[in-house]
Image: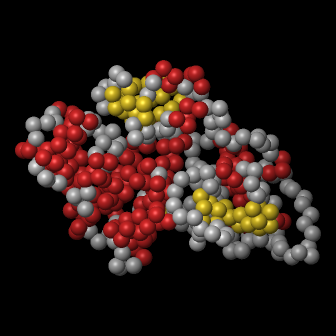
Amino acid sequence: IPYVVVGGMSFYKRKEVKDVLAYLKILINPHDSTSILRVINEPPRGIGEASVNALISYATSRNMPLYHVLHDFENTLDKPKGRSKAAIEKFSSIMKKYSELAQNSSDTDYLFDYIEDTGMLEYYREIDSEESRDRLANIEQLLNDITAYINEAPDRNLQSYIEQASLVSDLDTKDFSGEKLTLMTVHSAKGLEFNHVFISGMEENLFPLHREFSDYDIEEERRLFYVGITRAKKTLALAYAAKRLKFGKIFHNKHSNFLTEIEPEVICDVYNNSFLATKKKFSFDSSVSIAMQPKKNFPVFDDLMHTDNYSQLPENDITYITYRIGDTVKHSTFGIGKILNISGINESKKITVHFNSVGRKQLLLQFAKLEIVK
């Protein structure tokens, strides 16, 4: 189905997705030096730039695959020492362990353990920001997609999935003529209208998203739902999954309570949901006029106050556009590091960076003079 993603980049072009795919490519082809170099210090594990350059230099001068140098660097290389040495040993042992599992295992359970052991998931959990939670969700979705794809047919495997992902990524650069399915977040949909709107994932722990909610958080999510349902001009379809795959495990989530807050007179219950069994059935007959008599036992959307800006950040916060969590940056004194967190706004904005040389540092962004490393 031709589609266009509004307000976001292609799924396969997201940094965290490309990182996970690089890890998976190493399992298929250990000689893929490009993928190794992408993730050797992703997340930051203390393998410095000098150590990486020494490994590359040794491999190039002796025409050896970088993978072999990593696994036998003590016998082939004077450097690295200390922390870098321990980090390289751990990295190479993870690669070796899961490369063997990939060759001998017929299921996909090892994939979830593999990405967990790389430290990526813990890294984003530790940051614990809105963006890091989005990145975790994208990694989860990728692993779920791989599992579902491989399990659908006996001739499918990790290599065929990665080949398919490359093709899909290429298609994202092409322009489709004619009508397209428009995919967007609720935030991106504000101010737009469509004849037909579908909102999926109407489950507790998803919409609303599971957090340690304050009353404000719930109200904000409720307002976002209001924005979503009022984008529809003709029809609105709301759906939730009876079961959902998350990191290789099946979860049975409860339907979103937001569904029960909609007046029953306007609901056409297609699948006879049990939680709507006590509500009045309604048939969408064009000859029937709808008389709304809202009950006040629960919040009614018409009663809700709403604001014009649903963004998490001020629109004039230019520094957020420049620096993003997960970016690799360079400091004149501390050297190369990776952004862990960004807090505050404007002149008070602070940035937390894990530098390879000195560890974690918190800096005032306006004085940090950080250079983004591509």
In the picture shown, does residue 358 fall above or below 5?
above
> In front: 107, or 87?
87
Residue 47 in sight in this render: yes
Furthest residue toward left: 75
Name the spot of residue 321 as percent of width and height, x first.
55, 37
Name the spot of residue 286 as percent of width and height, x first.
89, 75
Quadrant assignment for the C terminus: top left
In the rendered structure, the answer to whether residue 301 lies left or right of residue 125 reads right
In the rendered structure, the answer to whether residue 53 lies left or right of residue 243 reads left
> In front: 150, or 109?
150
Q: Residue at x 33, y 68 (%)?
A: 159
| Number of numbered labels in the structure image | 0
In the rendered structure, the answer to whether residue 369 lies left or right of residue 335 reads right
- Quarter-of-image position of residue 288: bottom right
Colour scheme of the rendered structure: secondary structure
Name the spot of residue 163 as percent of width and height, x first.
37, 68
Furthest residue toward bottom: 154
In the picture shown, does residue 24 fall above or below 132?
below
Q: Residue at x 40, y 73 (%)?
A: 151
Quadrant assignment for the N terminus: bottom right
- Quarter-of-image position of residue 320: top right
Name the spot of residue 275 as percent of width and height, x first.
69, 65
Residue 240 in sight in this render: no
Q: Residue at x 72, y 50 (%)?
A: 190
> In front: 350, or 262?
350
Q: Residue at x 34, y 55 (%)?
A: 22
> In front: 275, or 237?
237
